[in-house]
Amino acid sequence: RAALLLGGAPDDVPEERPGGHPYAADLVRGPDELMPAVRRLLRGIVAVGTLEDAEDLVYAHPGLTAVTAEGDLLGAHFAQGGSAGAPSLLEVQASVDEAAEELEQLAAQCEELALVQERAGERRKECAALVEELGERRRAADREKSSVAQQLGALAGQARGAAGEAERSTAAAAT
């Protein structure tokens, strides 16, 4: 099943603007050959700002249908409308598709980040091992320095003792 809007029909232009509100067809722009069909399709539909304006218009002109800025329709014997926030099936499907695409992108990003994290963990282990090795070298150097300082102290003591002995020997030889 298909619905077509056929051009070329005679024009049906209403004369008056009820309550100063424009006809819905006056708000539509399109090819000149289709505008008569658009006016015929939207015949008797008047655009108003609010539901209260629609009530006033339909009360004054029961043969007309009012459409509000929110998309509510109000006629003398029917009303159609509802929450403007309720998404259509097409909008819901588009949201699902967008979410699925975003999920794929995030999954790929997670995989990349997991690899980066793994490499960073390996690098951290390498650096920790290097820090441990450098710490051990430093401790060994400190032990060596301490040993050298002890040896130096012992040698300094021996040198002082030898110098004292040399002074005594020189003094004894001079006497």
Image (cartoon, rainbow, N blue to C red):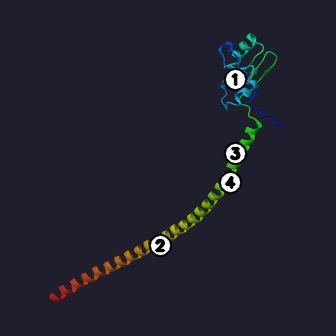
Depth order, front residue of 167/72: 72
Residue 72, position as x, y percentages in the image:
73, 23
Give the number of the mark in front: 1 or 3.
1
Sequence-first tag of 1 and 2: 1
Circle 4 residues within 10 Å: few <14, some 14–19, many ≥20:
few
Residue 165, position as x, y percentages in the image:
25, 84
Sequence-first tag of 1 and 3: 1
The residues tagged by marks 4 and 1 sit, at their Cα atoms, a distance apart of 48 Å
> Which of the 4 image quadrants contains residue 163?
bottom left
The residues tagged by marks 1 and 3 sit, at their Cα atoms, a distance apart of 34 Å
Q: Amino acid at mark 4?
A: Ala
Depth order, front residue of 104/87: 87
Q: Is residue 64 left or right of residue 156?
A: right
| Quadrant location, the C terminus | bottom left
Give the number of the mark in front: 1 or 2.
1
Residue matched to label 2: 137
Residue occupying image coordinates x 37% and y 78%: 151
> Which of the 4 image quadrants contains residue 118?
bottom right
Above or below, comparing residue 59 to residue 133 in the picture: above
Residue 46, position as x, y percentages in the image:
71, 19
Residue matched to label 3: 98
Residue matched to label 1: 24
The residues tagged by marks 1 and 2 sit, at their Cα atoms, a distance apart of 88 Å
Residue 70, position as x, y percentages in the image:
69, 25
Give the number of the mark in front: 2 or 3.
3
